[in-house]
Image (tube, helix red, strand yellow):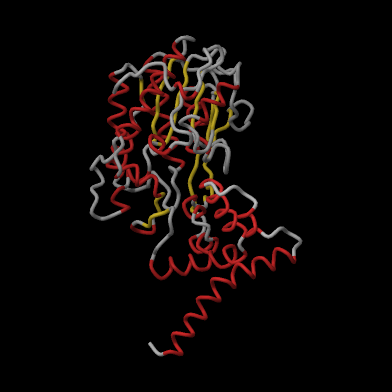
């Protein structure tokens, strides 16, 4: 390397190192804002504060906001690298990394924590005369591992969630096994219609409808509820779904490149009033869950998701508590704050996507329900039931 080239590279490196923060400071002062870089002397030098400082700089950076999306788009276009939150499979299918990590990184302790939380919740409800049905939803790579890599067998049954289902059944907890149902449906339909969206973590409208039929049949078979008297009808509609995996990559140009994915849905309405489906907080059936309940139900096209189709199959409206990403603990906290919601309930259905067994927001805490003894989170669960 010649001396002039070395000097140029050193100069360019110094320009980047000092020029970017200096330009950022000038922009902030010109806008009448405080200089973010000086926050380093305004906070105590703890590890948490340093991480927060780094995140604040990243989010406030003019260069990061304007250049990063373009660089990430170029990186994907050149190397098919989708960044830190996603994986690109075959046929332009995108997968959320935590879904894949859940399958390849085993954690017996995480399953045990979930098992104990479920047993404790079952007992809390039983004390009130309420039954519990647990419904883990398979992550997309559990049903379509061959869309992630050609080396995977679509019937390999990689998911350890089946072990949790077996343990719960042995402990007397009723479950809805969507893993077996989805695998059977996929084999029967020969991939004519995918059960999951190509660039989203969630299931299709048809899969949500089929899952509702499984749960309704289970409840009626157990005799926990009887069929109601509300007559529902459906109308077909196409929803345009922009993939959440693409959105998490924060590359708007990439979202525009692929565009929204059309999804066929069946919108549920009452036969007598023609009104689209609505929950009833006084229903004997309550369902708790995450965004797999929200999709198509509370976002476009609405009244076409799992909840509406469960109500249609049961011929009665249901009640619901939904929290995106919070089905492991947050929905139970929300339930604990709704003192009257459990009044008159016969059944609670608890849905959560399987990755939450390891990566659920706030883990699997014991949450007191109204009327329970108040337990601190650090006391954990009332007993240590083993799987």
Residue 121: percent from left, percent from top: 44, 19
Q: Quadrant of residue 122?
A: top left
Does 124 appear above or below 52? above
Residue at the spot x=45%, y=49% of the render? 200
Residue 349: percent from left, percent from top: 45, 24
Residue 306: percent from left, percent from top: 48, 33
Q: Quadrant of the N terminus?
A: bottom left
For residue 337, side relative to residue 122 (left or right): right
For residue 124, side relative to residue 222 (left or right): right
Residue 339: percent from left, percent from top: 60, 17
For residue 326, side relative to residue 139 (left or right): right
Q: Quadrant of the C terminus?
A: top left
Total residue callouts: 0
Q: Spot the residue most to the right.
A: 32
Does 143 appear above or below 58? above
Q: Nearer the viewer, residue 46 or 147?
A: 46
Q: Nearer the viewer, residue 38 or 89?
A: 38
Residue at the spot x=50%, y=68% of the render? 71
Q: Quadrant of residue 56?
A: bottom right
């Amino acid at each position: 390397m010649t001396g002039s080239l070395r000097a140029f590279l050193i100069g360019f490196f110094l320009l980047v190192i000092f020029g970017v923060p200096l330009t950022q400071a000038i922009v902030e002062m010109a806008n009448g804002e405080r200089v973010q870089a000086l926050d380093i002397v305004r906070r105590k030098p703890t590890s948490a504060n340093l991480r927060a400082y780094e995140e604040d700089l990243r989010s406030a950076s003019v260069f990061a906001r304007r250049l990063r999306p373009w660089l990430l788009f170029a990186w994907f276009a050149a190397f098919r690298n989708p960044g830190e939150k996603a994986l690109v499979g075959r046929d332009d299918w995108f997968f959320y990394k935590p879904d894949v990590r859940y399958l390849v990184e085993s954690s017996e302790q995480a399953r045990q924590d979930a098992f104990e939380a479920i047993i404790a919740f079952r007992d809390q409800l039983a004390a009130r005369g309420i039954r519990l049905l647990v419904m883990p939803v398979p992550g997309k790579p559990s049903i379509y591992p061959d869309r992630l890599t050609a080396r995977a067998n679509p019937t390999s049954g990689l998911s350890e969630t089946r072990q949790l289902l077996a343990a719960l059944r042995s402990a007397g907890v009723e479950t809805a096994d969507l893993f077996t149902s989805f695998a059977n449906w996929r084999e029967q339909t020969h991939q004519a219609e995918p059960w999951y969206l190509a660039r989203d973590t969630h299931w299709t409208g048809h899969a949500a409808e089929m899952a509702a039929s499984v749960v309704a049949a289970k409840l009626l078979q157990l005799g926990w509820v009887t069929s109601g008297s509300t007559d529902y009808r459906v109308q077909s509609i196409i929803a345009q779904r922009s993939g959440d995996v693409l959105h998490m990559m924060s590359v708007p140009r990439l979202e525009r490149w692929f565009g929204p994915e059309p999804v066929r849905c069946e919108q549920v309405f009452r036969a007598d009033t023609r009104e689209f489906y609505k929950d009833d907080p006084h229903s004997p059936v309550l369902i708790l869950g995450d965004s797999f309940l929200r999709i198509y139900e509370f976002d476009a096209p609405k009244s076409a998701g799992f909840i509406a189709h469960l109500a249609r199959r049961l011929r009665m409206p249901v009640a619901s508590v939904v929290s995106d990403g919070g089905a492991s603990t947050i929905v139970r906290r929300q339930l604990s704050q709704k003192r009257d919601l459990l009044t008159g309930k016969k059944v609670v259905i608890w849905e959560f996507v399987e990755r939450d067994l390891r990566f659920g927001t706030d883990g699997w805490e014991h949450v007191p329900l109204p009327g329970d003894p108040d337990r601190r989170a650090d006391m954990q669960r009332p007993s240590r039931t083993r799987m």
